[in-house]
């Protein structure tokens, strides 16, 4: 039988390529624009790939087994990606996420059986109540029990940590973080920001698929940079076999573009600002990104991203997430500014717009954030 599978995890990856003919015509782009439709992964995003790959590696290396609690700081998509594999292998899940992340993503993760802890968006990554550090707190508390936990026990720990965060008990969180506890089989943080298998996933899968789908003829790849795993893994592979140019897309307020253009990380961090687009941009430089492999970085603001995201849905019937709008806007801006013609250009579209029906696609939400609804002027400059 064709197209029949044993598990949902078997249909992760091998995503199709779609040409954006209507966008090309509308903006008079003299290049071929293709997207890699990562929103068609079963969990709705490119992160299904790393969830599967990273947990397979951890299992093979003896770090996890049935009953292990997988804990991860994630803006949502990585949570879903980990969940698809975790459910199928019998791991439990706790995800910590910043308060700015959409409610849909939280509901989705809970539907998949995960526990969720929300932590403030605005605090520094090394603050004891950041969503990165809160994940470590959970790991320490589980590890201290020295056994596999049932759902009730796990729920108790999660509620306790959430209350410490809510009540801003920073000293208590820090005291837990200060405890020196050895890694155990009971709790595991894949840490997509510091896991070599994150970029390797894309080196092994996404990049090689692209290469085969285009028979080796790709002039440019444009991708957003969150952990940097996608762009770094793709660059690692394509730079080995071709002269493909790799261009990153960065939201204004993130530090990647500043550091790429020569600013020290210490200085760049002072310029970090929050923004609304989800999944791309950072106020740290994670181990999973190699900026040297990225040829250039384009900056895009929230208005540009969201206007383009909504335009794309109406023009091509492709309901993608806000970061896909950022990538498309940044690509068209770059091609126009650099007067690039007759090239094969591939854009990575990381996730589905269904994650953002109450955000990017909601007029009230845009107005609340002082953004224009379907601002055409902003798109006209790309023509
Ligand atoms: N877009 C969205 C919506 C994402 O969730 C992510 C992952 N953080 C990215 C883009 C960027 O991918 P990466 O982490 O591989 O750089």
Image: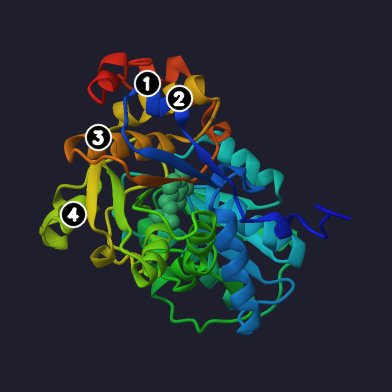
Q: Is there a contact, CB below 8 Å, between mark 3 and mark 1? A: no
Q: Is mark 4 within 8 Å of ligand 1?
A: no
Q: Which residue is mark 4?
A: 269
Determine whether label 1 and label 2 are within 8 Å by CB.
yes
Residue at image coords 60%, 50%? 15
Which x, y percent locates residue 306? 38, 27
Circle 3 or circle 1, nearest the eye: 1
Q: Mark 2 or mark 4, which is nearer the start of the sequence?
A: 2
Instruction: State which tag comes first along the sequence, 3 or 1.
Output: 1
x%, y% of residue 328? 37, 36
Say which quadrant the C terminus sits in: top left
Up-down: is 80 above or below 360?
Answer: below
Under tag 4, what secondary structure? helix
User: Callout 3: helix, strand or loop?
Assistant: helix
In the rendered image, the vertical position of residue 68 relative to residue 324, given as above or below: below
Using residue 1 as the reference point, say whether residue 36 is left or right of it. left
Separation of residues labelled 3 and 2 (CA atoms): 17 Å
x and y, in percent, of residue 365 in the image: 43, 20
Which residue is at the front of the view, 259 or 35? 35
Report, in whole angstroms, how far the alpha carbon at label 3 lies from the one at label 1. Answer: 14 Å
Instruction: Tell me the element at label 2.
Output: helix
* Mark seen at residue 26: 1
Count the numbered circles shown.
4
**Label placed on residue 358:** none
Q: Earlier in the sequence, mark 1 or mark 4?
A: 1
Reading the image, the residue beneath label 3 is: 333
- Asked whether 353 or 102 is in front, the reply is 353
Which residue appears at 70% of the width and 55% of the height? 11
Answer yes or no: disc 2 within 8 Å of ligand 1: no
Question: Which labelled disc corresponds to residue 22?
Answer: 2
């Amino acid at each position: 039988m064709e197209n029949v599978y044993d598990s949902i995890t078997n249909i992760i990856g091998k995503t199709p390529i779609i040409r954006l003919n209507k966008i090309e015509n509308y903006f008079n782009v003299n290049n071929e624009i293709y997207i890699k439709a990562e929103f068609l992964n079963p969990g709705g995003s490119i992160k299904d790939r790393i969830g599967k790959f990273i947990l397979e590696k951890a299992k093979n290396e003896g770090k996890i087994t049935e009953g292990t609690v997988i804990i991860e700081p994630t803006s949502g998509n990585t949570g879903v990606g980990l969940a698809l594999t975790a459910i199928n292998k019998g791991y439990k899940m706790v995800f910590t996420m910043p308060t700015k992340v959409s409610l849909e993503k939280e509901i989705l993760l809970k539907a998949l059986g995960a526990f969720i802890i929300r932590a403030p968006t605005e605090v520094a990554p090394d603050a004891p109540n950041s969503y990165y550090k809160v994940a470590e707190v959970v790991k320490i508390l589980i590890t201290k029990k020295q056994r596999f936990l049932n759902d009730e026990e796990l729920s108790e720990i999660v509620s306790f940590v959430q209350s410490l965060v809510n009540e801003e008990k920073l000293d208590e969180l820090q005291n837990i973080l200060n405890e020196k506890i050895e890694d155990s089989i009971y709790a595991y943080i894949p840490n997509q920001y510091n896991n070599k298998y994150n970029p390797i996933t894309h080196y092994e899968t996404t990049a090689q698929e692209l290469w085969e789908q285009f028979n080796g003829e790709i002039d440019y790849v444009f991708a957003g940079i969150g952990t940097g795993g996608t762009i770094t893994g793709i660059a690692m592979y394509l730079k080995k076999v071709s002269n493909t140019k790799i261009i990153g897309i960065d939201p204004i307020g993130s530090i990647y573009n500043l550091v790429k253009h020569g600013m020290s990380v210490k200085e760049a961090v002072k310029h970090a600002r929050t923004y609304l687009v989800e999944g791309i941009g950072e106020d740290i430089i994670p181990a999973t990104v190699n900026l040297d492999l990225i040829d250039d970085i384009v900056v895009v603001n929230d208005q540009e991203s969201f206007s383009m995201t909504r335009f794309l849905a109406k023009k091509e019937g492709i309901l993608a997430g806000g970061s896909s709008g950022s990538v498309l806007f940044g690509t068209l801006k770059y091609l126009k500014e650099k007067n690039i013609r007759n090239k094969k250009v591939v854009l990575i579209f990381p996730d589905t717009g269904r994650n953002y029906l109450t955000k990017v696609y909601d007029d009230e939400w845009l107005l609340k954030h002082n953004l224009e609804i379907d601002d055409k002027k902003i798109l006209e400059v790309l023509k």
